[in-house]
Image (cartoon, rainbow, N blue to C red):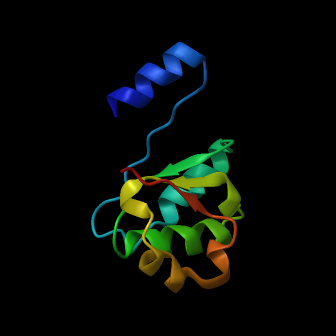
Amino acid sequence: IPIYELLSQKYGFELSQIEVPHPGNEQQAQWLTIRREHPDYVVLRGWGVMNPVALKTAQKTGFPADHIIGNVWSNSEEYVIPAGDAAKGYTAITTQ
């Protein structure tokens, strides 16, 4: 994602972009990679089933939901409810 690359260069943070194939109902390998890389934050750019699966899998691998920030496609309450307690602390943005 070009804007993330520009921001990482400008502000000096390390960027790792990990793809999740659609529909996103299997993410174990990606979250194990995230656990291994131990980032400060994860930006979630998913939709549909991908979001609750991401939150549940993050919890299983020990990544805290309060360090996951969802983008505009990941901000629907209907996507978060199925994650249950795994979603506590999760934050998402919206645009007007």
Q: As displayed, is residue 87 above or below residue 3?
A: below
Residue located at (43% from left, 54% from top): 94
Q: Is residue 65 visible?
A: yes
Is 33 situated above or below 63? Answer: above
- In the picture as drawn, the residue positioned furthest to the left comes out as 22
Q: Is residue 57 above or below residue 68?
A: below
Q: Residue at x 43, y 46 (%)?
A: 18
Direction from residue 55 to residue 4 in the image, left or right: left
Query: Could you say which is closer to the camera, residue 89 or residue 86?
Result: 89
**Residue 20, picture quadrant:** bottom left
Instruction: Look at 48% across and 23% down and name the residue there.
Output: 7
Residue sitting nearer the eye, 26 or 70: 70
Count of residue discs: 0
Give the quadrant of the N terminus: top left
Q: Is residue 70 left or right of residue 63?
A: left
State the residue at coordinates (69%, 65%). 89
Give residue 85's quadrant in the image: bottom right
Q: Position of residue 21 (x, y in %)?
A: 30, 60
Residue 63 can be seen, yes or no: no
Give the left or right position of residue 37, taking residue 4 as reference: right
Quarter-of-image position of residue 31: bottom right
Q: Position of residue 29 (x, y in %)?
A: 49, 60
Q: Residue furthest top?
A: 10
In the rendered image, residue 35, in percent from the top left (x then y), is placed at 65, 53
The answer to whether residue 91 is above or below residue 41 is below
